[in-house]
Amino acid sequence: MIERMNTTSRTTDVHGTTRLLINAYLQSGLTEDRTLTPMFTTITQTNTALGDAIDRSKAQSILADKDAIRDAADRAVGYLVKGYTYHPDEAIRNAALVVEAVFNKYGFSVTEEGYVTESSHLVSMLADYAAPEVQAAIALLPGVAENIGILQAAQDDFENTQTQYAEELAEEDNLPNATELKKEVLALVNDDLVIFLRSADRFQAETYGAFAAVVAKIIADLNETVRKRRSKDDSDD
């Protein structure tokens, strides 16, 4: 009996396993079959869309990581400057107050803004830090210029990454997401392919038996991976 693909499989597992099924079909000698051909045309198109959605998800993940880096860099500037406002040396303390006044215009809450708003505020903050009187104050505070440099680099990196993925990110709102497409692929495989091959293997084994066995093995391997992963996760609890 051919198993159905486990619906708790990861999106990437479903995509990869379905690619194996497509390759098996292409090598099966059944590419002219009147039932399998339209079935695999739809499976291939939907799985390709799933792969594209996974790539778009990766773009979002990469951008989120870049945002986390610039958030940390912004906080590093703020905490260091605020620490200097308690310095016993009056000159250092007063210099810190000058720089802190710039930071406080934007505050730690800037890291909670949306990407576009945060970028706008950070660019303005960095421009304010470049003012001559602020630069003079920064020069009296060890480590602050370095932290601001790290923030500048992190902001530049974020904007470069956002530009790199702009087209994919813009399209994402108008396209099915990976979770939706995963469900579609699972339905096509489980409700169409598996059901058909169970019957075909029983009544026309000479035609479909070999292909059905390959499909059964591919799906069984996936399901075993999912079971082992779940068992490991349970044992880690």
Image (cartoon, grey):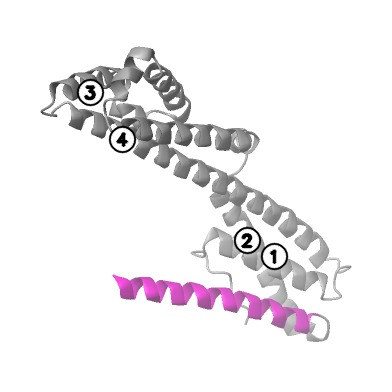
Q: Give SS at disc 4.
A: loop
Q: Separation of disc 2 and disc 1 at Cα?
A: 6 Å
Left or right of residue 188, residue 70 in this image: left
Amino acid type, label 3: Ala
Mostly what secondary structure, the magenta segment?
Answer: helix
Structural crowding at the residue carrying mark 3, measured as other residues with C-alpha within 10 Å and reported as few (<14), some (14–19) or many (≥20): many
Q: Give SS at disc 2.
A: helix
Q: Which residue is mark 4?
A: 143
N-term-proximal mark, 3 vs 2: 2
Q: Separation of disc 1 and disc 4 at Cα?
A: 52 Å
Identify the image quadrant of the C terminus: bottom left
Q: Is residue 224 magenta?
A: yes
Q: Is residue 64 positioned above or below 13 on the image? A: above
Q: Which residue is mark 1?
A: 19
Structural crowding at the residue carrying mark 4, measured as other residues with C-alpha within 10 Å and reported as few (<14), some (14–19) or many (≥20): some
The image quadrant that residue 17 belongs to is bottom right
* Residue with the most extreme bottom position: 206
N-term-proximal mark, 1 vs 3: 1
Q: Which residue is mark 2?
A: 15
Q: Tell me which residue sits at (58%, 69%) in the image.
A: 5
Q: Separation of disc 1 and disc 3 at Cα?
A: 59 Å
Q: Is residue 214 positioned above or below 8 on the image? A: below
Q: Which residue is mark 3?
A: 96
